[in-house]
Amino acid sequence: MRIAELMGEVPPAARPPVLCYHRVGGPLELGVTRVASSIFARQMTTLARAGWKTLTLDQFAERLQPGYSAFRTPHSAFLLTFDDGFASLAEHVYPLLADVGFTATTFLITDYVGRLNTWDVRYTWHRLAHLDWDTIGRWQARGFDFASHTASHARLTWLSDGQAAAELAGSRETLRHRLGPLAARAVAYPFGARDERIERLASAAGYEVGFGGVRGNGSPLGLARLPVYMWDVARIPLGVRKDGLGWLGRNVAHAANRCAVGTSLMLKLLPAPRSLLPL
C-alpha cells in the first residue's frame, strides 16, 4: 500500500460499500424502490453468514478521516442505509437486522416523522406511514443510527440558496434536539441530487458527511451509495460483491436515479398538500 494511502484520506476504492434501501415489504407500488421482505431477509442472512459486518455511522465517518488505516476494520464491512424512514422498517427490517447482529442508518424526513408520506407521488393505493419519534428512540437505544434526509424531501438542486439552507439546517436542528449530536452529522440528499453548491450549503449547516447517488465525487459531503431496487434479487446485493456493482449495474442504478427527476417534476406541478396529515 502506498504511503499516501496510509497517511492521507482513505481513497474511494478503499472505503467500505454503502448500500441504500428504501422500502422493504408492505404494499406493492408502481415504482422500483420496494424490495420484498423475503428477498431482504435472504440477503441479510447470507451476508451475515458470509462474515460481513455492518458499520455504525460513527465507524464509517471515522474511516473518512485523514490518516485512517484501512487495516483497522475488516474488508467485509459495509454501511447499511435506508432512506425516508417508513414505519414498516420497524416491522420488516429492524428486528431481522438485530437477529443477525446488524445495525443500520436511517435517513429521516424530519417534517414527516410520525405522519403520512404526502410529500411523495402516490405510488401505492394508500399513503404510507413514517416512523414516529418514540419508535425511532427505541431503536436508537438498541444501536441503530438516524440522520437527515432534509426537512421535506425537496430536490435541493432546484431550490434557492436560502430554501436549500433552510431544508438542511432545519432538519439538522430537529435531529440534534430530538436524538443528539450524532444524528446531526450526516445527510442523504433527496433523489441523490447534489452539486458543489449543495455540498457547500450542507457544510455550512454543520454536516460532516453527505450521501448522493451512484456516482460520488470522493469528498466527505459527496459520497456515493449503491441503491438496491426491486430487480436486485440475488442472495448478495450487487453492491457488496467482491467484484463491486459492475459497469452495467452502476449504469442501471444511475438511470433509475435520473428517472427520479420525473417524480420531482410531478411534485412540483401538483398543488402542495394543505396540511401534513397525522396518523
Image: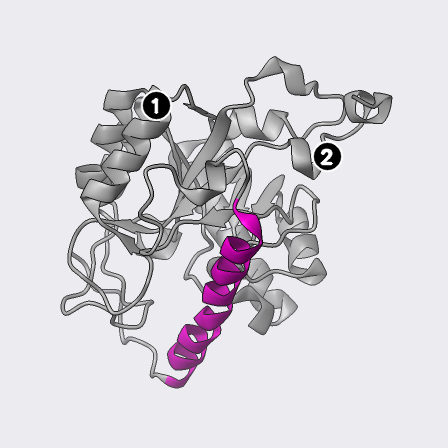
Tell how many labels.
2
In what quadrant of the picture does the C terminus appear?
Answer: bottom left
User: Residue 248: x and y, percent?
Assistant: 53, 57
Secondary element at image label 1: helix
User: Residue 247: x and y, percent?
Assistant: 58, 54
Q: Residue at x 70, y 45 (%)?
A: 218
Three-letter amino acid code of the residue under disc 1: Ala
Q: Is residue 182 magenta?
A: no
In what quadrant of the picture does the N terminus appear?
Answer: top right
Q: Residue at x 55, y 38 (%)?
A: 243
Three-letter amino acid code of the residue under disc 2: Pro
Between residue 97 and residue 268, name the one nearer to us: 97
State which region is magenta. Answer: 245-269
> Compared with residue 67, is residue 17 higher up or lower down, i.e. above or below?
below
User: Residue 154: x and y, percent?
Assistant: 46, 66
Between label 2 and label 1, give the one nearer the viewer. 1
Mark 2–mark 1 Cα distance, whole angstroms, equals 26 Å
> Compared with residue 266, is residue 150 higher up or lower down, i.e. above or below?
above
Classify 10 Å Cα crowding around label 2: few (below 14), some (14-19), many (20 and above). some
Which residue is labeled 1 in the image?
48
Quadrant in the picture for residue 74: top right
- 91 left or right, relative to 102: left
Colouring style: one colour
Most prominent secondary structure in the magenta stretch?
helix
User: Residue 207: x and y, percent?
Assistant: 60, 43
Which residue is labeled 2 in the image?
11
Q: Residue at x 26, y 65 (%)?
A: 276
